[in-house]
Image (cartoon, helix red, strand yellow):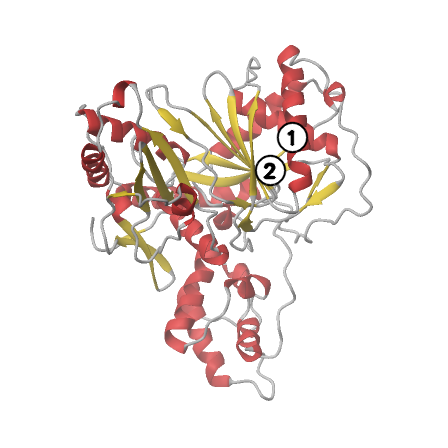
Amino acid sequence: MADLTEAAFAQHGIRMAHLASGGTAYHMPLVLRLGAGIDAGIDAGTVAKACTALVERHPLLAGALVERDGITYVAPAETVPGLRIAAPGERAEDEIARPFDLERGPLIRFVLFGRDLVVTAHHTVFDGFSKDLVVRDLLAFCDGSEIRPLPISFAEHADAERRRVDAALVAAREFWKPRWRGQAPVVVRNGILNSRRAEAGAVLDLELPRVEVPGLTVFEATAAALHVLLFSYGNSRPVTAIDLSTRTSDTADLIGPFVNELLLASEPAEDLTFREFGLRVRSELRDIYRFREVPLARAVPRIAPHAALAPISVSYRKQSERIDADVEWLVFNGAVRGDLQLQIVDTGRALLGSLRYSARAAEHAQPFADELGAVLRRLADDPDRLIADLLTVVPDAAETVPSAEPAHEDGSSGHLPAATGASGGAGADADLVEQIREIWQEVLGVPRVEVDDDLFDLDGHSLTVTQIVARMRARLGIEIPIDVLFDNPTIAGALDAVNAH
C-alpha cells in the first residue's frame, strides 16, 4: 500500500459520521464457529496464518484513515492486524465494543474465543458482503484452497469511482432535486420517530417471511411491504434510507465499504394492488440505482453528516451460496443508527433480521416487527390484493405531527438565517475576515466570496465544508463544528461562531 491514497467517498462519509457520533455504531462484527465438518482440524496456528494471509490479500484491512487539508486518506496502520487469543474470562461483547482508533488503525481485529473466531471490522473498511468474503477467504487459506487473484486494488477502485461520480454529478443533482423534500419525521403506531443520530441501542432478532412476487426481487417486495406498513401508520409519502451496493464485476471479491445510503420514497394508494405498487417501487429503485455511487451529500446541498439519512433504514444482502460454515452474521454491535435500523440477510429460505432500535423507539420495535411480518405473510397468500386490504394497522391519532424541515425552492433543506455580525460594521475583525475569505475562495475556486455569500450557492458541498474547516483549523487555529457551517454557511456565520467561543 502506498503511504497515502485518497479514500473512497463511502470512507469519507463514514469517517465524518463516526467522528460526529463515536460509539460502536460503525463496528461490524461476525462470529465464525470452528466446529465439526470442514473446519474440524483447524487449530490456532492455522487460523493465525489465515488471518495474516487475508490481510495480505486485502491490504485495506492494514490501513488507517487520516485527514490532510480536509481530505480523507488511507495510510498504513501503525500495527498489522493479526490473530489474538482471548484471555481467560474475556467476553466477546467487550471485544466487539472496544473502540477503533481511525487515525492509527488497524481497522479490523481477529480474536479467538475457544473455537469461536470473532472478527470485528470498522465500517470504513467493511460492508455486509465483506463478511462473506472474510469467511470464504479465511476458510480457503485454512484448507489451502486456491484463490483467484484480485483484478483491482481498493485504491484503484476509489480513483475510478471518483471519475464516475464526477461524470454523473450533474445528472444526479437533477434526479434528486424533485425528490429531496427536507428531513421529515416518520409516524409509527402511537408515536413519531425523527432521530438520525448514532447512539447506544438494543436489538430484536427476528425472522421474516421470504416473499417472491412475480416481477419483483425479494428485496423489492420486502421494501414495498415496509412502505405499505408505514403508509398504514399514516405516512402519506413513506421515506426510508436504503443501503445500495456499489460493487462492480471488478470489485466483487474486494473487502471494503462498497455501499451508499440513499433515500427511497413512495406514494402508496389504497386502490392499487400490491403488485402494482411494488412495480412502482421497483421502477424507482432502478432509477436510483443509476446514481448509486453518487453520495447524496454531493447531489443535494446542505445535508450535514448524520449516521442515517432517515429515522428508519434498511440494509439487505443475500448470503453467499458458496459458504458452508457456521457463521453468526448479524452480531449486535450495541448501537443503532437512527431510530429503527433493520438489517436483513436472505438465506434463500428465510429473511434473518436484526432490528436495532433506540430508547425512543423501544416501545415500537416489537409491534413494528410483528406487523411487517403480518404484511409479508398476507402478500405470500395473494400479491394481487389491494393495499386497502393490507392496512390492518389502525394506530391512535398522534396529537401533533412535526413537519419536515422547511425546504427551499431547489428542494434543499432549510437552515438558519445567515449571521450578520461580520458584514463589515463596527467591531468586525477585518483581518480575520480576509483570512477566512482567502480560504473559502481557495476551496470553492471562485475569485471573490462576500461575507454573506452562501457557500452552497457557490457549488459547495459536504466535502467542501470539511476542507474549509480543516484549513481554518490548520492556518488560523480556529475550530468550528461542521454543523455550524451547515446551519450558517457564510463567512459571517463562521466569524460569529468564532466570537461565540
Q: Is 247 placed left or right of 268 in the picture?
A: left
Percent position of residue 55, x then y: 23, 41
Tell me the residue at 35%/56% (across/down).
Answer: 101
Instruction: Specify the quadrant that holds the C terminus.
Output: bottom right
In what element is the residue under mark 1? helix
Tell me the residue at 49%/58% (across/down).
Answer: 20
Residue under label 2: 240
Percent position of residue 462, x then y: 48, 56
> Separation of disc 2 and disc 1 at Cα?
8 Å
| Kind of residue sitting beneath label 2 | Thr
Sooner in the amino-acid sequence: mark 2 or mark 1: 1
The vertical placement of 388 against 445, above or below, is above
Which quadrant of the structure image shows residue 123? top left
Residue under label 1: 227
Name the outermost residue toward the bottom.
426
Percent position of residue 484, x then y: 55, 66
Pointer 2 with pointer 1, Cβ within 8 A: yes
